[in-house]
Amino acid sequence: MIRHTVRALCAASLVIAPLALSTPAHAATVCTVNGLSSPDGNVTGTAGNDYIECASVDSGDTVNGLGGADMIVLTGPVGGTVSAGDGRDYVHVTEDGTVSGTVGAGADGDYVEVEGSIAPGAKVYGDAGNDYLRILANFGVVQAGTDSSRVLAKGGVVDAGTGFDLCRVVGDTPSNCEL
Ligand SMILES: [Ca+2]
């Protein structure tokens, strides 16, 4: 009986093996910073304006734009932590992007656009400053943070935080929206 089970497990693992190769347990972080490929691992911008594009952010890694008006474009799975840092940043999660980690715009008035989706347990936040957040599919949490922000979202938990916030949310009732 045990031998049978072992044999069955071996057979199963042989079948699973090719799938496991295509989706490794440790997904790589694949980003470019100002056009240059960044090594796998944590990704850091400069104190000035940066253009950071990531096809994948591993759950153990962070991407930080630091100061300056940064443009961060996320085109694939985001399992880790992305922070645009200080400055008026533009954070764009494209149609193929899925956020299962955390994406934050940092201080100052930022523009955050998520055309992909925010998974359950994931968070996208505007932080301090008059932010503009446009979220097409939210199954997680969206927070506008302090100051007066505008939030357009579909579904999920939306908390506009402090300040005089304008919200247009389809689905669940958002909290802390003044208009
Ligand atoms: Ca920067």
Image (spheres, rainbow, N blue to C red):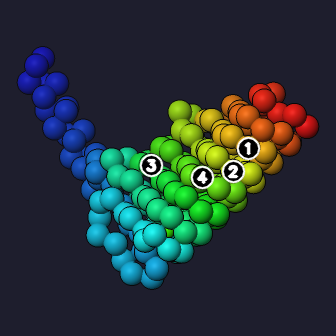
Q: Upstream in the sequence, badge 2 or badge 4? A: 4
Q: Secondary structure at mark 1?
A: loop
Q: CA distance from mark 4 to mark 1?
A: 10 Å
Which quadrant, please, contains the C terminus? top right
What residue do we see at 22% from left, 41% from top?
13
What residue do we see at 64% from left, 63% from top?
88
In terms of image quadrants, where is residue 49? bottom right
Direction top: furthest residue: 1
Badge 3: residue crowd in 10 Å (few <14, some 14–19, many ≥20): many
| Amino acid at circle 1 | Asp
Q: Are marks 2 and 4 in contact (CB under 8 Å)?
A: yes
In the image: residue 114, left or right of residue 175: left
Direction left: furthest residue: 3
Label 2 sits on residue? 129
Q: Nearer the viewer, residue 147 or 95?
A: 147
Q: Upstream in the sequence, badge 2 or badge 1? A: 2
Residue 106: image location, x then y, percent: 57, 52
Label 4 sits on residue? 107
Query: Which disc, if any, is residue 110?
Result: none
**Is 136 rendered above or below residue 146?**
below
In the image: residue 165, left or right of residue 29: right
Q: Secondary structure at mark 3?
A: strand
Q: Nearer the viewer, mark 3 or mark 4?
A: 4
| Amino acid at circle 3 | Thr
Q: CA distance from mark 3 to mark 1?
A: 23 Å
Badge 2: residue crowd in 10 Å (few <14, some 14–19, many ≥20): many
Query: Which disc, if any, is residue 147?
Result: 1
Label 3 sits on residue? 81
**Is 29 rendered above or below residue 147?**
below
Q: Is residue 168 visible?
A: yes
Ligand 1 within 8 Å of the CB at mark 3? no
In the image: residue 13, left or right of residue 112: left
